């Protein structure tokens, strides 16, 4: 089924479809440049596959910055004494009932 969509997308446009495709490409570019996530752009523009919208990803103003900031936040979280265990959802095995009650 995916191959059908890709074949349709790769076919040259019929006469009159050029203008429509150009407008759709312009709208898609503007949405991505405005920072709208690609998944939302896909649905707003009627694209059937995310792969067809990914070609516009480079137009996002901060596409790499957001990912780097998220990784930095995760790294800071993991650098805390209990961060590694908290990230994995584990409890601190060294913490006993007496240390819990005295810490509070």
Image (spheres, grey):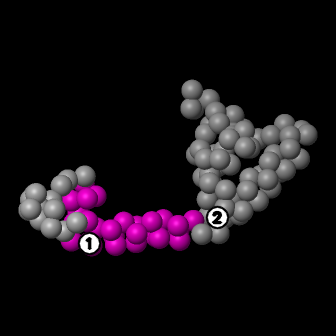
Work out whether residue 30 or residue 69 is closer to the camera in this orientation and state it: 69
> Is residue 98 part of the magenta span, yes or no?
no
* SS majority, magenta: helix
Q: Quadrant of the C terminus?
A: bottom left
Residue 10 can be seen, yes or no: no
| Badge count | 2
User: What secondary structure is found at the residue carrying circle 2?
Assistant: loop
In whole angstroms, how far apart are the C-alphas of marks 2 and 1? 32 Å
Q: Position of residue 99 (x, y in %)?
A: 11, 65
Residue 33: quadrant of the picture: bottom right
Query: Is 88 situated above or below 13?
Result: below
On the image, numbered disc 2 is attached to which residue? 60
The residue at 9%/62% (across/down) is 98
Mark 1 highlights which residue?
Answer: 80
Q: Name which residue lies at 86% across and 44% down.
A: 20
**In the image as oriented, which residue stretches furthest toward the right?**
16
Q: Nearer the viewer, residue 54 or 80?
A: 80
Whole-percent x, y for residue 73 in the image: 40, 69
Position of 88 with respect to 39 (left or right) is left
**Quick check: marks 2 and 1 in contact, CB under 8 Å?**
no
Left or right placement of residue 2 versus residue 68 in this view: right
Does 53 sit left or right of 67 as displayed?
right
> In the displayed structure, would residue 28 be above or below residue 62?
above
The foreground one among 98 and 9 is 98
Which quadrant of the structure image shows residue 103?
Answer: bottom left
Q: Residues within 10 Å of mark 1 (few under 14, many from 20)?
A: few
Q: Is residue 12 above or below residue 63?
A: above
Q: Which residues are magenta?
A: 63-88
Point out residue 53 in the picture as x, y percentages from the top left corner. 64, 49
Residue 70 drawn in magenta: yes
Task: Name the front one of labels 2 and 1.
Answer: 1
């Amino acid at each position: 089924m995916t191959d059908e969509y890709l074949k349709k997308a790769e076919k040259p446009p019929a006469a009159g479809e050029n203008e429509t495709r150009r407008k759709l490409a312009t709208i898609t570019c503007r949405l991505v440049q405005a920072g709208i996530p690609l998944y939302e752009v896909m649905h707003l523009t009627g694209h059937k596959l995310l792969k067809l919208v990914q070609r516009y990803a480079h137009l996002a103003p901060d596409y790499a910055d957001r990912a780097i900031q998220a990784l930095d936040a995760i790294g800071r979280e993991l650098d805390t004494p209990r961060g590694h265990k908290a990230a994995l959802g584990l409890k601190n095995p060294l913490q006993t009932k007496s240390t819990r009650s005295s810490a509070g």
